[in-house]
Image (tube, rainbow, N blue to C red):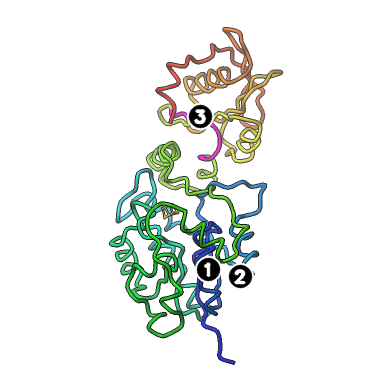
Amino acid sequence: MSKKIKAVCLFSGGLDSVIAAKLMIDQGISVFGLKIDTPFYERNILAKDKAIISAENLNMPLKILGVNPDYLRIVRNPRHGHGSGMNPCIDCRIYMLKKAWEYAEQIGAKFIITGEVVGQRPMSQRTHAMKLIENASHLKGKIIRPLSGKNLLKTDAEKEGWITRESLHGICGRSRKMQMHLAKELGIDNYQPPGGGCLLTCAEFARKVRDLLLHKKRVFTVDLDMLKTGRHFRFRKNKIIVGADETDNKQLLKLKNKTDYIFEVPEIGSPVTILTGPKTKDAIKLAARLTARYSDAKEDRVLVRYGSKQAVKGICVQPIKQKEIENLRI
Ligand code: SF4
């Protein structure tokens, strides 16, 4: 029996990557899934990762790889620019494909599979961007895009006879109709719903990332996790984060640095607020006023407790007015 050809599929668990992997598995290729897990994906920490569920459904091995500090340098200063938010899609794809090839070399895989569709995404999935990405990642001819392959140049895998052009499709554009149809044909009926996408494309999150990168030279995972939690306000060198619900409150207490201050209105429904940066009188007062504003207190003057380990000191403040909030909100 001849040895099966191996390939690595960049796999998010979304419908496109599931179809791409399935089409190649059906061609007799031994497909290994690889999910590059950036800190900018929206995720429900209580739910199982959809890439894991989808890989299990396909009976396909899956490796999940985190990103290194180079990835943050790309987000800060991408060679090919940002998209509509802080998404450096072209540089990000180059980064991911290089990682996929490193993995391919380790396991002896011959090519890379992606679920990309020509014209689906404005920045990285136009034909000339795809070519640029392919050249910059030194993978000319080695990337198979089974959903759109018929619209693209012949790849090495086709030339070698490992897969046929007939197994590829000619989908293009943003509509998902063809993928739904194809999924049905391939018997894929339990695919994961869309969502949980890359937060860098979201305008509000992009503002928070920009603010963070502007004010912090060295950024850690905890800083990025903070960006996904609560309402964020900028006051000079301070950042004030106010929890929006119970989950945020718990998360903020978990993520806070030991030099950060906690604020709370005692004995009443109150957010947890975290003050980072220099603990000046003005910053403390402002954090207290924001806490009072988002608490259930109805009075003109509200007692807010604060402190570094525990909120034990007290300050009496007027809740901040909506108009003042607008200028502070990141
Ligand atoms: S949307 Fe996010 S994860 Fe996807 S290519 Fe762009 S930057 Fe990368």
- Residue shown at 52% from the left, 78% from the top: 27
In this view of the protein, which residue sits in the foreground, 256 or 319?
319
Q: Point out which mark residue 21 bears.
A: 1
For the residues labelled 1 and 3, the Cα–Cα distance comes to 44 Å
- Residue 228 drawn in magenta: yes
What amino acid is at disc 3? Ile
Q: Is residue 100 left or right of residue 45?
A: left
Question: Nearer the viewer's eye, disc 1 or disc 2?
Answer: 1
Q: Picture quarter containing residue 165? A: bottom left
Q: Is residue 81 left or right of residue 49?
A: left
Picture coordinates of residue 278, whole percent (x, y): 48, 30
- Residue shown at 44% from the left, 63% from the top: 96
- Residue 330 drawn in magenta: no
What amino acid is at disc 1? Ala
Mark 1 or mark 2, earlier in chain: 1
Residue corresponding to mark 2: 60
Picture coordinates of residue 310, whole percent (x, y): 67, 29
Instruction: Determine if the C-beta at disc 2 is less than 8 A from ligand 1.
Output: no
Q: Picture quarter containing residue 148? A: bottom left
Q: Is residue 217 visible?
A: yes
Q: Single out the residue that lies furthest toward the bottom.
A: 1
